[in-house]
C-alpha cells in the first residue's frame, strides 16, 4: 500500500509506503515528524507506479502546470527525457578545456585510492601509533616526514590530548 501525503508545515508531497507499519513519518523537505494517522492521504494505491503518477499530477496541479502534465504519457517518460537531456560530465569538462581523465584520477585519489592525501590529524594519530618511540619528538618527526609541519604536528598532538583522543603519560603518547 502506498499513500501520497502532504506536509502541513512546508506543503511537500511524498510517497509513504505502507503507512500502517509506522507510527510516524518525516517530511523529506523540512524534516518535520508527523503522526501517520493524522496525515491526510491524498491518494492511495497498492501500485507504487500509480502512486508516483498521482503525486506528479498533484504537483503539476499545485504549480498550475496541469495542461503540460496532461501531455505527458507517464512519469517514467519524464525520467527518460531527463536522463537523455544535456551533456554528460566528460563532454562538459572537455568543452570547458579541462582534462576529464585528470579530474577522474583526482576523484579516485580523494576517495581513498592510490596516493590519497590524508588529513594532518590522521597523520598525527598514525604517528602516535607507528612512531619508533611514542615521544613527542618521534611523533613530530614521523608526521614531518609525511608532510605535516613540525609546529602543526605539535599543536595537533596537544589538541588530541586535550580532546581525549590521545593520552600522555611521562612524555609517552598513545591513541585511546
Image (spheres, rainbow, N blue to C red):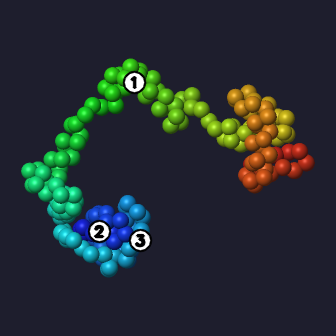
- Secondary element type, mark 2: strand
C-alpha separation, residue under disc 3 versus residue under disc 2? 12 Å
Of the two numbered discs 3 and 1 in the rendering, the one whose residue sits closer to the viewer: 3
List the residue tagged with mark 1: 100
- Secondary element type, mark 1: helix
Q: Earlier in the sequence, mark 1 or mark 2?
A: 2
Q: Earlier in the sequence, mark 3 or mark 2?
A: 2
C-alpha separation, residue under disc 3 versus residue under disc 1? 43 Å
* Residue 56 in the image, given as x and y percentages of width and height: 20, 58
* Residue 73 in the image, given as x and y percentages of width and height: 9, 51
Q: Would residue 13 be found to the left or right of residue 71 on screen?
A: right
List the residue tagged with mark 3: 33
List the residue tagged with mark 2: 6
Q: Residue at x 25, y 34 (%)?
A: 86
Q: Residue at x 8, y 50 (%)?
A: 71
Q: Would residue 117 be found to the left or right of residue 69 on screen?
A: right
Q: Residues within 10 Å of mark 3 (few under 14, many from 20)?
A: few
Q: Earlier in the sequence, mark 3 or mark 1?
A: 3
Q: Would residue 86 be found to the left or right of residue 115 on screen?
A: left
Check contact, mark 1 vs mark 2: CB within 8 A: no
Q: Residues within 10 Å of mark 1 (few under 14, many from 20)?
A: some
Q: Residue at x 22, y 58 (%)?
A: 63
Amino acid at each position: 500500500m502506498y499513500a501520497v501525503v502532504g506536509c502541513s508545515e512546508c506543503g511537500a508531497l511524498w510517497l509513504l509506503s505502507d503507512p500502517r507499519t509506522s507510527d510516524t513519518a518525516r517530511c523529506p523537505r523540512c524534516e518535520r515528524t508527523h503522526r501517520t494517522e493524522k496525515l491526510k492521504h491524498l491518494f492511495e494505491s497498492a501500485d507504487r507506479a500509480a502512486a508516483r503518477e498521482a503525486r506528479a499530477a498533484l504537483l503539476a496541479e499545485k504549480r498550475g502546470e496541469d495542461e503540460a502534465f496532461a501531455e505527458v504519457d507517464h512519469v517514467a517518460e519524464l525520467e527518460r527525457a531527463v536522463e537523455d537531456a544535456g551533456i554528460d560530465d566528460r563532454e562538459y569538462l572537455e568543452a570547458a578545456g579541462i582534462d576529464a581523465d585528470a579530474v577522474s584520477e583526482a576523484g579516485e585519489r580523494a576517495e581513498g585510492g592510490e596516493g590519497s592525501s590524508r588529513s594532518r590529524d590522521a597523520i598525527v594519530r598514525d604517528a602516535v601509533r607507528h612512531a619508533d618511540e611514542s615521544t613527542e619528538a618521534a611523533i613530530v618527526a614521523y608526521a614531518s616526514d609525511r608532510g605535516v609541519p613540525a609546529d602543526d604536528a605539535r599543536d595537533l598532538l596537544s589538541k588530541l590530548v586535550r580532546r581525549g583522543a590521545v593520552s600522555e603519560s611521562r612524555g609517552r603518547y598513545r591513541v585511546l
